Image: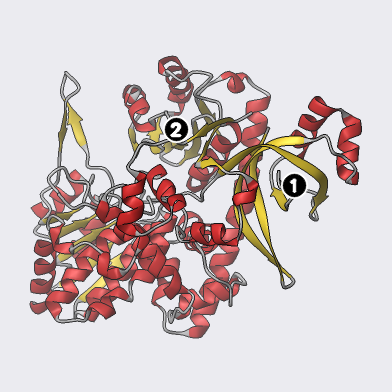
Amino acid sequence: MKKWYVKNKKANYKEIEEKFNISELLTRLLVNRDITDDELIKSFIDPRVENLHDPRLMKDVEKGAQIILNKIHSNKKIRIIGDYDVDGVISSYILYVALQRCGAEVDYEIPDRVKDGYGINHDMIRKAKEDEIDTIITCDNGISAIEPINYAKDIGLTVIVTDHHEVPFIEDELGKRKFISSRADAIINPKQPDCTYKAKDLCGAGVAFKLIQVLYEESGISKEECYSLIEYVAIATVCDVVDLIDENRIFVKQGLQMISQTKNIGLRALIKENQMEGKNISTYHLGFILGPCINASGRLDSAKKGLQLLITKDPEEANELAKELHELNQERKTMTLRSVEEAIELIETTDLKKDKVLVIYLPDTHESLAGIVAGRIKEYYHVPTIVITKTEEGAKGSGRSIEGYHMFEELLKCRELLNKFGGHPMAAGLSLEEENISLLRRKLNQVTTLTEEDLLPKIYLDMQVPLDLIDYDFIDDLNKLAPFGKGNSKPLFGEKGIQVLRGSVLGKNKNVLKLRLISRKGNIFEGIYFGDIKIFEQLIIRKYGEHELEQLYQGTTDKVYLDLAFQPGVNDFNGNRSIQLVIEDFR
C-alpha cells in the first residue's frame, strides 16, 4: 500500500500568474517543483538557448579555454580522458570534435570499467607521457583524482579538469569538512564551493559544453555552430538523471528537436536499429533506448565503441556499430533480469527480507550491472539496496537509495569496513574485502534510523482534480511543462470516489488493465493501469466481493468506486483521439 500526499506549497500564485502570463494550473505545478525564482521560471516557460547563463561566470572556464588555445597555437598534443558511461562518452565526443574544429592535435582515452575502474589513473598518465602528450583534459571525472593529477603535474603535464561530481573532502575530529582539490591547471566544476555559477546540477557534458562555448567564442566560431552540439548534451543530461530545470531543461528541450533531425550518421543508425525512425523522440527514448545502447558498450565491452559510433563518417561502419551496440544492450537486459531474479529469490528465502537496508552478495553478477540490479530491487521492495559482486580485485558494489536515506552519509558511518567508496544521497559505489560484506550488512542495519513509515512507498500528488475539469485544453497546458524527467516529473493528480463502470484485461501477457470511468457530471473517461492486476482484483474482492469483480469485468456493475492517482494524456489510436488517464495507484 502506498501513502498518498497532496503537495501544498506556499507562494504568491496570483503574482506569478500575472507576471509571467501563465495559467493557475501551470503556476501551481511550477511551485510544486520549487521553481519560484524569476530567472528559473523564465527559462522554464521559455527554454531558448538565449536564456543559457554566461559560461564565463563558471570558475576557471576562461582560464581553461585560454590554456587550450595556447596549446593549439603551440602545436602541443592534447588527450581527452573521459568515462565509460553515457555522460562520459558524450562529454568526450563534444570535446573531441570541438577541439578538432579549433585546430587541435587531439585524441581520447576512456578507461575500461573492469580493468581500469572509474576515472583517470596513474597508468593512463604514464601512457600519456610516453605518447608525448602535453595536456590532459578530463571530462565527467577528475575532481576526486587528487593523487593521479598531482602525479601528472609532477611529471610535467598540463591538466584541465571538467567534472560535475561532488568535491572531495576530509573531516577533522569534530566532523568539520575541509574540501580538497588537486594541482590541476584549471578545475571546471560548478559544485566547487568557490564557484558562483548558478546552474549547479549540470551533467559532465553540460560542464564540457560551457568550456566549448568560451573556446568557440575566443576562436571566432559562431554561436550557432556551438549550439549544434546541444543535441548530444541532451542525451547525456537525460541519461545522467540530473534535474531538468534551468539550463538542463534548455539543453533537453532544444536537443530533442535537433535529434529528430540529426545529421550524425551514427546516431541515425542507432535510431534506425531501434526502429525509431519517424517517431517523435522523447526523454523516454533517450533514457531507456538510445542511452542504454551507448552505455552497454561501456558495461560489457569498450565504451570507445559508443564514442566511435558518434565520430564515424562511414555509413557502413555506423550501421555495424549500431547493430553491435543494440545486441550488447539486449544481452545486458537478459543478464540483468537473471540477476534480479536471483536477488529476489535470495531475499525471499533468507532473513534478508527482515532488513531495512538490503546488502545482497551476487558473486556471479557482472560488476557493471550491480547498480542496475540494485535499482530494480530498490523499486521492488522500496528499501535502500546495495548489490555486491565478486571481481578480480575483490568485492565491489553499487547502491541505490530511497527518499530520506542519504546513502553516502550512511556509508561514512561504516568507512572502516570499506576499501573505497563514493557517491551522493541516492546512489553510491564501493569496494571492500569479501569477509566484510556481512559486517557491512549488519552495521548498516544497526545504525539506520529508518522507520516502518519511511519504508512505505509514497505518492506525491500535485493536486486533487475532478475528472470534469480534464479536457484537451487542460492537457495542452500540461504539455507546456514537457520534457519531463528528474526534477520535473510528469504531473500527477488525484480524485476520490470515481465510479468504475467496467474493467477489462488486455495485452499479450494479460498485464494491462483498462477501466471505463464516469465522472460526477456523467462524462466517460478511459483509465489504463500497467501495474500488478492481482493487487487490483484483491482490493475489489476485499471491499465488494468476488461477485462484484465478475460484474465489473462484465460491465454490469454500479457499485465500485475508487480513489485514483493518475496522469492525464491523449490516446491516439487508428485515427481516434481520446483522453486517457494513466493510473499510477488506486485505493
- 247 relative to 572 in the view: left or right: left
Please state which of the two labelled residues, at mark 1 or mark 2, is closer to the viewer.
1
Instruction: Report if residue 159 is visible in the image.
Output: yes
Q: Earlier in the sequence, mark 1 or mark 2?
A: 2
Residue 62 drawn at (x, y percent) = 11, 64
Q: Quadrant of residue 420?
A: top left
Residue at image position (42%, 46%) is: 28
Camera-nearest residue between 284 and 27: 27
User: Hey, what amino acid is under mark 1?
Assistant: Ile
Return the x and y of residue 158 as percentages of the image width and height.
11, 61
Q: Residue sitting at 64 percent across and 33 percent down? A: 344
Please tell me in which quadrant of the rendered image residue 406 appears: top left
Q: Which residue type does callout 2 highlight?
A: Glu
- What residue sits right under mark 2 in the picture? 403
Q: Is residue 290 above or below residue 527?
A: below
Q: Secondary structure at mark 2?
A: loop
Asked whether the viewer can see residue 487, the reply is no
Residue 476: give x, y in percent of width and height: 53, 62
Q: Which residue shows up at 33% across the image and 31% down it?
A: 419
Whether 541 is drawn above or below 105: the answer is: above
Above or below for 351 versus 194: above
Residue 518: image tag: 1
Looking at the image, which is closer to me, 115 or 524?
Answer: 524
Residue 585: x %, y % from top left = 64, 39
CA gap, disc 1 and disc 2:
35 Å
State left or right for residue 81 relative to residue 341. Answer: left
Q: Secondary structure at mark 1?
A: strand
Q: Residue at x 43, y 82 (%)?
A: 263
